[in-house]
Amino acid sequence: MKGSEVEVNFIDAVYRKAVRVTGLAQFIVKSDANPELLSLFFSGWPNLTSILCGFVKIHISEARLIVSPAYDRGATAEELRGKNLRELNAL
């Protein structure tokens, strides 16, 4: 398999948590993608049908959960959710 080593962070700004994924990435052109994947994707995001050119598949070699230091200080997920939603909604 041909690809590039990547590191991607998927961040939840409300709960102040993230997952860092490392692995080998492969670009799959839309016309070569699995039809079931295309159907599921476009049923959720139909407005992207005309502009999407492909997908990135990551063969994961490592995944790590990252959490805010606020959890170490005793904050709960619901407390952070409430605080962060209020701040985001105030923008």
Image: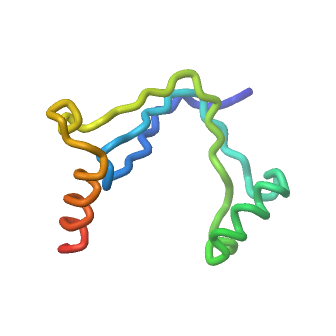
- The N terminus - image quarter: top right
For residue 72, which quarter of the picture?
Answer: top left
Residue shown at the point (29%, 52%) measured from the top left: 78
What is the tally of numbered marks visible in this picture? 0
Q: Position of residue 6 (x, y in %)?
A: 50, 32
Q: Quadrant of the C terminus?
A: bottom left
**Residue furthest top in the image:** 61
> Where 47 sits versus 9, above or below?
below
Image-based side of 40 in relation to 90, left or right: right
- Observer-nearest of 88 and 62: 88
Note whether 63 is above or below 88 in the view shown: above
Q: Position of residue 85 (x, y in %)?
A: 26, 64
Residue at horizontal 38%, vertical 40%? 18
Place residue 38 in its image quadrant.
bottom right
Residue shown at 67%/75% (left/top)?
46
Position in image of residue 5 (x %, y %): 54, 28
Single out the residue that lies furthest toward the bottom.
47
Looking at the picture, the colour scheme in use is: rainbow
